[in-house]
Image (cartoon, helix red, strand yellow):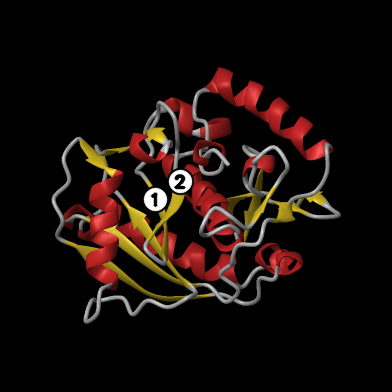
Amino acid sequence: MPQSTLNIVLPIDNARNVDIQRRVAAAATGDVTNHGGPVLANVQCTTVFLGDAWNQAPLSTMRDDFNAFLDDYLKSSEFANLSVYGISAGSRLGTLTTSDTLGATVLDADLQAIVQRLTASGGQISANANTLVFLFTPQGTLVDASAIGAGVTCTDHCGYHNFVGSVAYAVVPYLECSGCLGNGMTTEQSMTSVMSHELCEAVTDPMLNAWYSSSGEEIGDLCAWQETSVDGYTAQKEWINGQGCV
């Protein structure tokens, strides 16, 4: 299936409206099905904040909020709904702030290299079949993931997930463009929404060959831009077979 249909969150307002209509139409054709690939049944997340700027306010406060949100979300009834896809309890194993220096644009290939460095034998993350690495880029950096079909931050995506080797990873860029600040949300609210979107898609479709619809949409795509609240944090609704967007 085309990779670009699986992990892009469209950011532009006009595109968003069209995209909602397209995805709702896709949802009406039937539930998502498993295409034989694995899931992260007991996901173990590590958050990785790229660059020293995350150690300084205000980014350090956001970093702590993102970790707290992930802790809460993994224990929530919203995440428990994913049991219909074979997903059980998840956990956040830890967090890292690296000294990587990123320019105005970073390539997905560079991010893959960071994941490989961190999860290699003797690295800071002990990877296994349930590992999910969350990568956060600092303010002022766009991610160019054109090589894997996900395009560029703010032009084509607000976040995406993929894998390198046997390790799944999700990318959450620092969101400042109007198209990614959905429904009047702040940067932090938009980023926690993207976090929930990519988390749920990554655990149900980590290698891009597990749960998705007949039209190639993952469970976050089918409910794009439909927000809810989890313990006071903004999250996105996800497609649950037999229930719709929950």
Using a 10 Å C-alpha cutoff, classify the residue at mark 2 as few (fewer than 14 neighbours), some (14 to 19) or many (20 or more): many
Q: Is residue 167 above or below residue 107?
A: below
Q: What's under tag 2, amino acid-wise?
A: Tyr
* Residue 51 vertical placement versus 174 (above, below): below
Residue ID at (70%, 33%): 23
Q: Residue 14's quadrant in the figure?
A: top right
Report how many numbered discs are placed on residues in the image: 2
**Residue at the (83%, 37%) spot, across then down:** 28
Residue 129 is situated, as x and y percent measured from the top left of the image, at 48, 75
The residue at which mark 2 appears reads as 160
| Crowdedness near tag 1: few (<14), some (14–19) or many (≥20) residues, C-alpha within 10 Å | many
The answer to which quarter of the image holds residue 106 is top left
Give residue 178's quadrant in the image: top left
Query: At numbered mark 2, what does the secondary structure look like: helix, strand or loop?
Result: strand
Q: Earlier in the sequence, mark 2 or mark 1?
A: 2
Q: Residue furthest right?
A: 242
Kind of residue indicated by mark 1: Val
Residue 152 located left or right of residue 129: left
Horizontal and vertical percent position of residue 75: 61, 73
Residue at position x 22%, y 66% in the image: 117
Q: Judging from the image, what secondary structure is the residue with disc 1 in?
A: strand
Residue at 54% of width from left, 53% of height from top?
Answer: 208
Q: Position of residue 176 (x, y in %)?
A: 37, 34
Residue 171, label in figure: 1
103 left or right of 232? left
x and y percentages locating residue 1 in the rendered image: 58, 42
Question: Could you tell me how far apart the alpha carbons at marks 2 and 1 are, in whole angstroms?
Answer: 5 Å
Disc 2 and disc 1 in contact, CB within 8 angstroms = yes
